[in-house]
Image: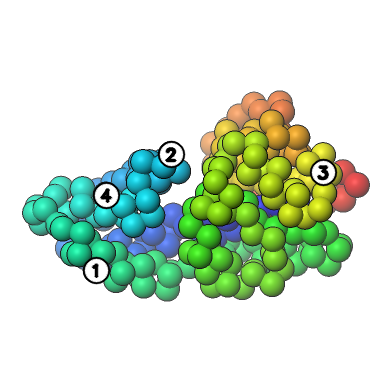
Amino acid sequence: MLFDLDGTLLDHDRAAAEAIVRAFPDADAAWLVPRWTDLGEAAIERYLAGELDFAGQRRARIGTLARELGLGTWDDARADAWFAGYTTLYEAAWRPYPDAVPAVEALAAEGLRLGVITNGDVRQQRSKLVGIGLAGRLPHLTASSEVGWAKPAPEIFRSACAGLGLAPGAVAYVGDRLLTDAQGAAAAGLTGIWLDRSDGPAQGAPDVVRITGLDALPRLIAGMA
């Protein structure tokens, strides 16, 4: 059983929102939080595409935001110094979703081989698992920065399965993004499970299984055995 990390196990959006509001307490939070989210998603896409390195995507995010806040143009040194402080705030806000630890514990108790597939820097993603107390339960970490492929590329899913010593058809993968996670996994031959935490109406996704919380996983996986 493999998991996505941000948005599935770790509440990244809440942590990032808390950190950016603390970093700019005088800004309008109603504008600041969604704008920071948009800048982050755009920068990460460029990082995964190889247009920016990890430091570069960070500089792009804060550089744009600083200009929009009327703080002028920041050089790399200022951007890096700011991001170091922001990272401290972000890490302090790391929390697992309430259903994450119980679900992982239940699956571990069943003797399943467990791991994570994540698009991101392996060092930071490993630190997140340690920070939310799941590193010991999820020993197999496959990160795009190490393997050279990013979700939804089938190679990253198959690399993770090889790390478990299992064929893709014997592995299930759960993530919060329908296309990138669940359908990407299904296209690579895994059982794709879409974690849809939204309050909206259910959307059709015939090639994957949809759940609304990780607490559904143990029974779901037991039914697949």
Crowding around mark 2 (Cα neighbors within 10 Å: few <14, some 14 to 19, many 20+) is few
Does 191 sit left or right of 224 as displayed? left
User: What secondary structure is marked by label 3?
Assistant: loop
Q: Where is 218 relative to 24, above or below?
A: above
Question: Which residue is the site of mark 2?
Answer: 49
Q: Are marks 4 and 3 in contact (CB under 8 Å)?
A: no
Q: Which callout, 4 or 3, points at the residue further toward the start of the chain?
A: 4
Q: Nearer the viewer, residue 137 or 80?
A: 80
Q: Alpha-carbon distance for marks 2 and 3?
A: 27 Å
Q: CA separation, marks 3 and 1?
A: 44 Å
Label 4 sits on residue: 60
Q: Residue at x 24, y 68 (%)?
A: 81
Q: Nearer the viewer, residue 122 or 114?
A: 122
Which of marks 3 and 2 precedes in the sequence? Answer: 2
| Amino acid, disc 3 | Ala
Query: What kind of element bears circle 2?
Result: loop
| Disc 2 to disc 4, C-alpha distance | 15 Å
According to the image, label 1 marks what residue?
81
Q: Are marks 3 and 1 in contact (CB under 8 Å)?
A: no
Query: Residue 150's x, y, as percent?
Result: 54, 43
Locate residue 170, reporting x and y percent.
84, 44
Tag in front: 2 or 4: 2
Amino acid type of disc 2? Ala
**Callout 2–callout 4 Cβ contact below 8 Å:** no
Residue at coordinates 75% horizontally, 59% vertically from top-left? 114
Q: Residues within 10 Å of mark 3 (few under 14, many from 20)?
A: some
Residue kind at label 4, given as amino acid type? Ala
Name the residue beneath numbered marker 3: 167
Q: Nearer the viewer, mark 1 or mark 2?
A: 2
Apparent side of residue 190 relative to residue 131 in the rendered image (left or right): right
Going from N to C along the chain, the mark reached first, 1 or 2, is 2
Q: Earlier in the sequence, mark 3 or mark 1?
A: 1
